[in-house]
Amino acid sequence: MALEDICGFQDTPLHRKCFPASHFEDTATSFDCYSAEFRGLKKSGRDSGIPLQFFIPSLPNSAPFNHRSTSHFSPSKHSVTVRRPFPLSHGTTTLGFIFQGGVIAAADTRASAGGLVACPAVHKITPIHSHLVVTSSGSGADCMLWERILAREIRLYQLRHRRCLSICGTAKLLSFMLHPFKGTDVCVALTLCGWDKEAGNTDSSFITDNSSSAGFSSQDVSAMAYPSSPNRGPKLIYVCSDGARLQGDVFSVGSGSPYAYGVLDGRLRWNLSKEEAVSLAREAVFRATHRDAYSGNNVDLFHITAQGWSRRKREELKEEYYRDMERRTKTVGERKRETVLYALG
Protein backbone atom coordinates (compact mmCIF):
# COMPACT_ATOMS: atom_id res chain seq x y z
CA MET A 1 0.00 0.00 0.00
CA ALA A 2 2.53 2.57 1.12
CA LEU A 3 5.13 1.37 -1.38
CA GLU A 4 2.62 1.75 -4.21
CA ASP A 5 1.96 5.35 -3.16
CA ILE A 6 5.66 6.20 -2.94
CA CYS A 7 6.61 4.54 -6.23
CA GLY A 8 3.58 5.88 -8.06
CA PHE A 9 2.45 2.40 -9.07
CA GLN A 10 -1.18 3.49 -9.24
CA ASP A 11 -0.36 5.77 -12.19
CA THR A 12 1.06 2.96 -14.33
CA PRO A 13 -0.88 1.35 -17.22
CA LEU A 14 -0.65 -2.03 -15.45
CA HIS A 15 -2.48 -0.73 -12.38
CA ARG A 16 -5.13 0.96 -14.53
CA LYS A 17 -5.64 -2.32 -16.36
CA CYS A 18 -5.87 -4.46 -13.21
CA PHE A 19 -7.92 -1.97 -11.17
CA PRO A 20 -9.98 0.05 -13.68
CA ALA A 21 -12.69 0.97 -11.15
CA SER A 22 -10.31 3.07 -9.08
CA HIS A 23 -9.69 5.41 -12.05
CA PHE A 24 -13.34 6.27 -12.82
CA GLU A 25 -13.98 9.78 -11.56
CA ASP A 26 -17.75 9.28 -11.55
CA THR A 27 -17.96 5.86 -9.86
CA ALA A 28 -15.85 6.37 -6.74
CA THR A 29 -15.31 9.08 -4.22
CA SER A 30 -12.44 9.42 -1.81
CA PHE A 31 -12.67 10.29 1.86
CA ASP A 32 -9.88 12.41 3.22
CA CYS A 33 -9.29 11.31 6.84
CA TYR A 34 -6.83 14.13 7.55
CA SER A 35 -9.48 16.85 7.28
CA ALA A 36 -10.89 18.21 10.52
CA GLU A 37 -14.26 18.85 8.90
CA PHE A 38 -13.90 15.86 6.54
CA ARG A 39 -14.08 18.32 3.61
CA GLY A 40 -16.92 16.25 2.28
CA LEU A 41 -16.67 13.47 -0.23
CA LYS A 42 -14.58 14.36 -3.25
CA LYS A 43 -13.88 12.74 -6.54
CA SER A 44 -11.21 10.09 -6.61
CA GLY A 45 -7.76 10.97 -7.84
CA ARG A 46 -4.17 11.42 -6.75
CA ASP A 47 -3.94 15.17 -7.12
CA SER A 48 -4.38 15.76 -3.36
CA GLY A 49 -1.24 13.80 -2.42
CA ILE A 50 -2.62 12.73 0.99
CA PRO A 51 -1.67 9.11 1.73
CA LEU A 52 -4.61 7.85 3.84
CA GLN A 53 -7.68 7.92 1.60
CA PHE A 54 -10.60 5.53 1.54
CA PHE A 55 -12.39 4.98 -1.75
CA ILE A 56 -16.13 4.84 -1.14
CA PRO A 57 -18.47 3.68 -3.93
CA SER A 58 -21.14 6.12 -4.93
CA LEU A 59 -24.74 5.53 -3.88
CA PRO A 60 -26.83 3.44 -6.29
CA ASN A 61 -28.75 5.51 -8.80
CA SER A 62 -31.46 4.41 -11.19
CA ALA A 63 -30.35 6.98 -13.79
CA PRO A 64 -28.06 5.86 -16.62
CA PHE A 65 -24.32 6.05 -16.09
CA ASN A 66 -23.85 9.03 -18.38
CA HIS A 67 -26.66 10.99 -16.71
CA ARG A 68 -25.61 10.64 -13.08
CA SER A 69 -25.60 13.76 -10.97
CA THR A 70 -22.18 15.27 -10.35
CA SER A 71 -23.15 17.12 -7.18
CA HIS A 72 -20.97 16.64 -4.11
CA PHE A 73 -21.90 16.02 -0.53
CA SER A 74 -21.51 19.20 1.46
CA PRO A 75 -19.42 19.10 4.67
CA SER A 76 -22.48 20.12 6.69
CA LYS A 77 -24.23 16.88 5.74
CA HIS A 78 -21.46 14.49 6.79
CA SER A 79 -23.51 13.35 9.80
CA VAL A 80 -26.15 11.75 7.54
CA THR A 81 -25.47 8.01 7.51
CA VAL A 82 -26.88 5.15 5.49
CA ARG A 83 -28.93 2.67 7.51
CA ARG A 84 -27.22 -0.68 7.85
CA PRO A 85 -29.00 -3.91 6.93
CA PHE A 86 -27.98 -5.33 10.33
CA PRO A 87 -26.84 -3.82 13.66
CA LEU A 88 -23.18 -3.86 14.66
CA SER A 89 -22.86 -6.04 17.76
CA HIS A 90 -19.52 -7.00 19.22
CA GLY A 91 -17.95 -8.06 22.52
CA THR A 92 -14.50 -8.97 23.74
CA THR A 93 -12.16 -9.02 26.71
CA THR A 94 -8.67 -7.52 26.46
CA LEU A 95 -6.37 -6.36 29.23
CA GLY A 96 -2.88 -5.09 29.88
CA PHE A 97 -0.92 -4.12 32.98
CA ILE A 98 2.57 -3.09 34.04
CA PHE A 99 4.59 -4.83 36.75
CA GLN A 100 8.23 -5.03 37.75
CA GLY A 101 8.99 -7.53 34.98
CA GLY A 102 7.55 -5.56 32.07
CA VAL A 103 4.11 -5.44 30.46
CA ILE A 104 1.53 -8.22 30.21
CA ALA A 105 -1.10 -8.20 27.43
CA ALA A 106 -3.87 -10.79 27.34
CA ALA A 107 -7.09 -11.30 25.38
CA ASP A 108 -9.68 -13.90 24.51
CA THR A 109 -10.12 -15.23 20.97
CA ARG A 110 -13.87 -15.14 20.36
CA ALA A 111 -15.28 -12.87 17.65
CA SER A 112 -19.00 -12.39 18.20
CA ALA A 113 -21.75 -10.71 16.20
CA GLY A 114 -24.70 -10.46 18.53
CA GLY A 115 -25.69 -13.99 19.52
CA LEU A 116 -23.51 -15.53 16.82
CA VAL A 117 -19.93 -16.69 17.40
CA ALA A 118 -18.42 -15.51 14.12
CA CYS A 119 -14.97 -17.00 14.78
CA PRO A 120 -13.58 -18.82 17.85
CA ALA A 121 -9.88 -18.30 17.04
CA VAL A 122 -9.29 -14.60 16.34
CA HIS A 123 -5.95 -12.93 17.09
CA LYS A 124 -6.82 -9.84 19.14
CA ILE A 125 -3.20 -9.08 20.05
CA THR A 126 -1.14 -7.91 17.08
CA PRO A 127 2.64 -7.31 17.15
CA ILE A 128 3.54 -3.98 15.51
CA HIS A 129 7.31 -4.22 15.93
CA SER A 130 9.80 -5.97 18.20
CA HIS A 131 8.88 -3.95 21.32
CA LEU A 132 5.20 -3.10 20.73
CA VAL A 133 1.99 -5.14 20.60
CA VAL A 134 -1.56 -3.82 20.30
CA THR A 135 -4.71 -5.31 21.82
CA SER A 136 -7.85 -4.56 19.82
CA SER A 137 -11.52 -4.34 20.71
CA GLY A 138 -14.44 -2.97 18.77
CA SER A 139 -15.37 -3.66 15.18
CA GLY A 140 -13.11 -6.38 13.81
CA ALA A 141 -12.76 -4.85 10.35
CA ASP A 142 -11.98 -1.38 11.71
CA CYS A 143 -9.40 -2.73 14.15
CA MET A 144 -7.62 -4.77 11.48
CA LEU A 145 -7.55 -1.80 9.11
CA TRP A 146 -6.12 0.66 11.62
CA GLU A 147 -3.57 -1.82 12.93
CA ARG A 148 -2.26 -2.22 9.39
CA ILE A 149 -2.23 1.54 8.85
CA LEU A 150 -0.36 2.03 12.13
CA ALA A 151 2.21 -0.65 11.27
CA ARG A 152 2.74 0.95 7.86
CA GLU A 153 3.23 4.44 9.27
CA ILE A 154 5.68 3.21 11.92
CA ARG A 155 7.67 1.33 9.29
CA LEU A 156 7.79 4.41 7.05
CA TYR A 157 8.92 6.53 10.02
CA GLN A 158 11.69 4.05 10.74
CA LEU A 159 12.83 4.10 7.11
CA ARG A 160 12.82 7.90 6.95
CA HIS A 161 14.45 8.68 10.31
CA ARG A 162 16.46 5.47 10.87
CA ARG A 163 15.04 5.04 14.36
CA CYS A 164 11.90 3.54 15.82
CA LEU A 165 9.05 5.80 16.91
CA SER A 166 8.49 5.83 20.67
CA ILE A 167 5.39 4.29 22.24
CA CYS A 168 4.05 7.70 23.27
CA GLY A 169 4.71 9.05 19.78
CA THR A 170 2.95 6.04 18.27
CA ALA A 171 -0.09 6.64 20.47
CA LYS A 172 -0.16 10.32 19.53
CA LEU A 173 0.09 9.48 15.82
CA LEU A 174 -2.75 6.97 16.09
CA SER A 175 -4.87 9.47 18.02
CA PHE A 176 -4.35 12.15 15.37
CA MET A 177 -5.29 9.71 12.59
CA LEU A 178 -8.45 8.55 14.38
CA HIS A 179 -9.71 11.94 15.57
CA PRO A 180 -11.26 13.01 12.22
CA PHE A 181 -13.58 9.99 12.50
CA LYS A 182 -15.07 11.16 15.80
CA GLY A 183 -18.85 10.91 15.67
CA THR A 184 -18.86 8.37 12.84
CA ASP A 185 -19.50 4.64 12.98
CA VAL A 186 -15.81 3.76 13.24
CA CYS A 187 -15.42 1.62 16.37
CA VAL A 188 -11.78 1.09 17.38
CA ALA A 189 -10.29 0.75 20.86
CA LEU A 190 -6.59 -0.14 20.87
CA THR A 191 -4.29 -0.59 23.86
CA LEU A 192 -0.60 -0.10 23.06
CA CYS A 193 1.57 -2.35 25.24
CA GLY A 194 5.26 -1.77 24.66
CA TRP A 195 8.72 -0.93 25.90
CA ASP A 196 10.63 2.18 24.86
CA LYS A 197 14.24 1.20 24.24
CA GLU A 198 17.30 3.22 25.16
CA ALA A 199 18.77 5.39 22.43
CA GLY A 200 21.09 3.39 20.24
CA ASN A 201 19.61 0.03 21.18
CA THR A 202 18.92 -1.80 17.92
CA ASP A 203 17.99 -5.17 19.37
CA SER A 204 14.90 -6.36 17.49
CA SER A 205 14.89 -10.06 18.22
CA PHE A 206 11.60 -11.85 18.82
CA ILE A 207 11.30 -14.34 21.67
CA THR A 208 9.03 -17.38 21.72
CA ASP A 209 8.01 -18.70 25.13
CA ASN A 210 6.00 -21.94 25.08
CA SER A 211 6.52 -22.86 28.73
CA SER A 212 3.56 -22.80 31.08
CA SER A 213 5.38 -20.87 33.82
CA ALA A 214 8.81 -19.46 34.52
CA GLY A 215 10.42 -17.42 37.29
CA PHE A 216 12.73 -14.45 37.25
CA SER A 217 16.31 -14.44 38.37
CA SER A 218 17.67 -11.36 40.08
CA GLN A 219 19.70 -10.62 36.96
CA ASP A 220 16.59 -10.65 34.77
CA VAL A 221 14.69 -8.33 37.12
CA SER A 222 17.54 -5.83 37.25
CA ALA A 223 17.81 -5.84 33.47
CA MET A 224 14.11 -5.06 33.10
CA ALA A 225 13.87 -2.37 35.77
CA TYR A 226 12.92 1.18 34.85
CA PRO A 227 15.72 3.09 33.10
CA SER A 228 16.77 6.42 34.53
CA SER A 229 14.94 8.38 31.81
CA PRO A 230 11.15 8.68 32.31
CA ASN A 231 10.70 8.35 28.54
CA ARG A 232 12.12 4.83 28.57
CA GLY A 233 10.76 1.61 29.97
CA PRO A 234 7.32 -0.06 29.90
CA LYS A 235 4.40 1.89 28.49
CA LEU A 236 0.67 1.19 28.45
CA ILE A 237 -1.52 3.62 26.47
CA TYR A 238 -5.17 3.36 25.47
CA VAL A 239 -6.40 5.00 22.24
CA CYS A 240 -10.00 4.93 21.00
CA SER A 241 -11.72 5.95 17.78
CA ASP A 242 -12.72 9.34 19.21
CA GLY A 243 -9.04 10.28 19.41
CA ALA A 244 -8.87 9.95 23.20
CA ARG A 245 -5.45 8.94 24.53
CA LEU A 246 -4.93 7.70 28.10
CA GLN A 247 -1.76 6.39 29.74
CA GLY A 248 -1.88 4.20 32.83
CA ASP A 249 -0.66 1.08 34.60
CA VAL A 250 -3.67 -1.18 33.96
CA PHE A 251 -6.38 -1.21 31.29
CA SER A 252 -9.14 -3.63 30.40
CA VAL A 253 -11.38 -3.00 27.40
CA GLY A 254 -14.44 -4.79 26.10
CA SER A 255 -17.73 -6.22 27.29
CA GLY A 256 -15.91 -8.47 29.76
CA SER A 257 -13.76 -5.70 31.22
CA PRO A 258 -15.83 -5.19 34.43
CA TYR A 259 -15.22 -8.81 35.41
CA ALA A 260 -11.53 -8.59 34.50
CA TYR A 261 -11.15 -5.42 36.58
CA GLY A 262 -12.69 -7.25 39.53
CA VAL A 263 -9.80 -9.72 39.47
CA LEU A 264 -7.06 -7.23 38.63
CA ASP A 265 -8.01 -4.66 41.27
CA GLY A 266 -7.81 -7.22 44.04
CA ARG A 267 -4.56 -8.98 43.16
CA LEU A 268 -2.45 -6.69 40.98
CA ARG A 269 0.68 -5.28 42.61
CA TRP A 270 4.03 -3.97 41.41
CA ASN A 271 6.31 -6.71 42.81
CA LEU A 272 4.66 -9.63 41.01
CA SER A 273 6.95 -12.26 39.53
CA LYS A 274 6.52 -13.34 35.93
CA GLU A 275 4.76 -16.54 36.97
CA GLU A 276 2.34 -14.63 39.20
CA ALA A 277 1.66 -11.98 36.54
CA VAL A 278 0.92 -14.60 33.89
CA SER A 279 -1.37 -16.47 36.29
CA LEU A 280 -3.20 -13.24 37.17
CA ALA A 281 -3.77 -12.34 33.51
CA ARG A 282 -5.07 -15.82 32.72
CA GLU A 283 -7.36 -15.73 35.75
CA ALA A 284 -8.76 -12.31 34.79
CA VAL A 285 -9.52 -13.38 31.21
CA PHE A 286 -11.00 -16.68 32.42
CA ARG A 287 -13.35 -15.00 34.91
CA ALA A 288 -14.44 -12.48 32.27
CA THR A 289 -15.16 -15.15 29.67
CA HIS A 290 -17.06 -17.23 32.23
CA ARG A 291 -19.47 -14.35 32.97
CA ASP A 292 -19.51 -12.61 29.58
CA ALA A 293 -21.19 -14.57 26.77
CA TYR A 294 -19.46 -12.50 24.08
CA SER A 295 -15.96 -13.57 25.21
CA GLY A 296 -14.47 -17.02 25.38
CA ASN A 297 -12.76 -19.98 23.69
CA ASN A 298 -9.01 -19.36 24.23
CA VAL A 299 -6.59 -16.94 25.85
CA ASP A 300 -3.61 -15.29 24.13
CA LEU A 301 -0.89 -13.78 26.29
CA PHE A 302 2.15 -11.62 25.45
CA HIS A 303 4.98 -10.49 27.71
CA ILE A 304 6.95 -7.39 26.68
CA THR A 305 10.37 -6.64 28.18
CA ALA A 306 13.49 -4.68 27.23
CA GLN A 307 14.52 -7.64 25.05
CA GLY A 308 11.29 -7.60 23.03
CA TRP A 309 7.95 -9.36 23.17
CA SER A 310 7.44 -13.03 23.89
CA ARG A 311 4.29 -14.97 23.13
CA ARG A 312 2.97 -17.82 25.20
CA LYS A 313 1.28 -20.82 23.67
CA ARG A 314 -2.46 -20.34 23.22
CA GLU A 315 -4.44 -22.02 26.01
CA GLU A 316 -8.02 -23.25 25.86
CA LEU A 317 -10.25 -21.80 28.56
CA LYS A 318 -12.47 -24.88 28.70
CA GLU A 319 -9.69 -26.83 30.41
CA GLU A 320 -9.26 -24.00 32.92
CA TYR A 321 -12.99 -24.13 33.59
CA TYR A 322 -12.84 -27.87 34.38
CA ARG A 323 -9.85 -27.36 36.66
CA ASP A 324 -11.71 -24.60 38.47
CA MET A 325 -14.76 -26.85 38.95
CA GLU A 326 -12.53 -29.59 40.40
CA ARG A 327 -11.01 -27.12 42.85
CA ARG A 328 -14.43 -25.91 43.91
CA THR A 329 -15.73 -29.47 44.37
CA LYS A 330 -12.70 -30.34 46.46
CA THR A 331 -13.13 -27.23 48.61
CA VAL A 332 -16.83 -27.94 49.19
CA GLY A 333 -16.04 -31.54 50.18
CA GLU A 334 -13.44 -30.42 52.70
CA ARG A 335 -15.85 -27.93 54.24
CA LYS A 336 -18.54 -30.58 54.55
CA ARG A 337 -16.16 -32.93 56.34
CA GLU A 338 -15.09 -30.15 58.70
CA THR A 339 -18.75 -29.37 59.43
CA VAL A 340 -19.54 -33.04 60.18
CA LEU A 341 -16.50 -33.41 62.45
CA TYR A 342 -17.40 -30.21 64.28
CA ALA A 343 -20.99 -31.43 64.79
CA LEU A 344 -19.84 -34.84 66.09
CA GLY A 345 -17.15 -33.41 68.32
Image (cartoon, rainbow, N blue to C red):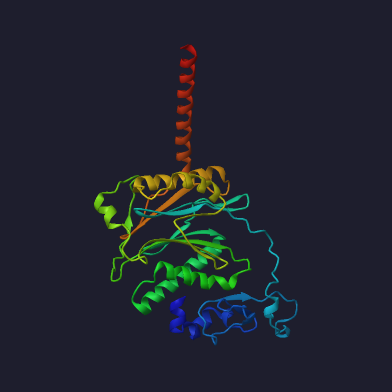
In this rendering, would 302 be left or right of 220?
A: right
Which residue is the extreme one toward the right?
62
> Looking at the image, can residue 126 be seen?
yes
In this rendering, would 220 be left or right of 95?
A: left
In this rendering, would 147 be left or right of 220?
A: right
Residue 338, placed above or below residue 33: above
Q: How many marks?
A: 0
Query: In the figure, residue 192 lies in which quadrant?
Result: bottom left
Residue at image point 41% right, 49% down: 314
Query: In the figure, residue 41 lies in which quadrant?
Result: bottom right
Q: Position of residue 179 (x, y in %)?
A: 56, 71
Which residue is the extreme one toward the left?
219
Q: Position of residue 133 (x, y in %)?
A: 42, 61
Query: In the figure, residue 316 lies in which quadrant?
Result: top left
In this rendering, would 198 be left or right of 96?
A: left
Residue 92, placed above or below residue 227: above
Q: Position of residue 46 (x, y in %)?
A: 54, 85
Which residue is the extreme one toward the bottom?
47
Residue at image point 46% right, 82% down: 9
Q: Nearer the viewer, residue 10 or 241?
A: 241
> Looking at the image, can residue 149 be seen?
no
Q: Nearer the viewer, residue 333 or 212?
A: 333
Residue at image point 67% right, 75% down: 78
Residue at image point 67% right, 58% down: 87
